[in-house]
Image (cartoon, helix red, strand yellow):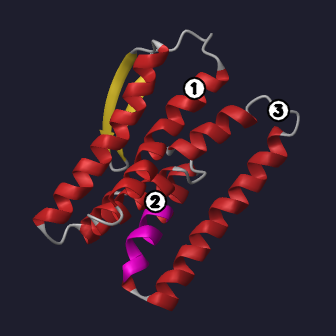
Amino acid sequence: MFTALLFLLRDKRTVGDILLVCGLHEWGHLAVMAVCGARIRAIHLSGFGIRIIPRKSGTEPLLQSIAILLAGPMVNILLFVLMREKMPEMAMISLGTGIYNLLPFVQLDGGAILEMLILGSVHEYGLRMALRLLRMALFAFSAVLVYSYGLEFLPLSAAILQCVINEY
């Protein structure tokens, strides 16, 4: 993600838009955590952004955990809907952030949800193999986008490659 952001940081406005969109994404997680009565154990900053680690007791309902994880991307998608006409560039950054966070990589919200659903499944091994193939296919697709449409897709491809590398 850090590599992809470097490419996007062409002007101060874009930097501000990215920071605001990412902040609102995290606020979505925090708001649902507060509604559910969840507490924060730690907050980590990394090349993938901010990671909020809740305090777990082991008795949290699965749907609550999924709701917390989905809250960030849903905020991004809602912002896209609300801003697409008045602030189209920021709306697209928000939509991209929301969709990116739903990708099936463990360090992203979508992958964390899939991990919770797969863990302990009778077909866990097969599902993990299918996910590996899907992740590789996503990277291959992003590389084809770069080849076909140019450097505007390079940040996405770099971010997905970084996710693939971190998975293994």
Residue matched to label 3: 121
Q: Is mark 1 on a helix, strand or loop?
A: helix
Sequence-wise first label, 1 or 2:
1
Type of the residue with mark 2: Gln
* Nearer to us: label 1 or label 3: 1
Sequence-wise first label, 1 or 3:
1
Rendered residue at 37%/51% (across/down): 79
Task: State how far apart marks 1 and 3 are (Cα).
Answer: 17 Å
Type of the residue with mark 1: Ser
Q: Residue 69: x percent and y percent?
A: 52, 35
Quadrant (top left, top right, bottom left, bottom right) of the N terminus? bottom left
Task: State how far apart marks 1 and 2 are (Cα).
Answer: 25 Å
* Nearer to us: label 3 or label 2: 3
Rendered residue at 13%/69% (across/down): 11
Answer above or below: position of 74 versus 117: below
Q: Is mark 2 on a helix, strand or loop?
A: helix
Q: Is residue 155 magenta?
A: yes
Q: What stretch is highlighted in magenta?
A: 152-160
The answer to whether one can see residue 3 in this image is no
Q: What element carries label 3?
A: loop
Answer above or below: position of 39 versus 115: above
- Decide: few, some or many residues near mark 2? Use Cα within 10 Å; few <14, some 14-19, many ≥20: some
Majority secondary structure in the magenta region: helix
Mark sitting on residue 65: 1
- Decide: few, some or many residues near mark 3? Use Cα within 10 Å; few <14, some 14-19, many ≥20: few
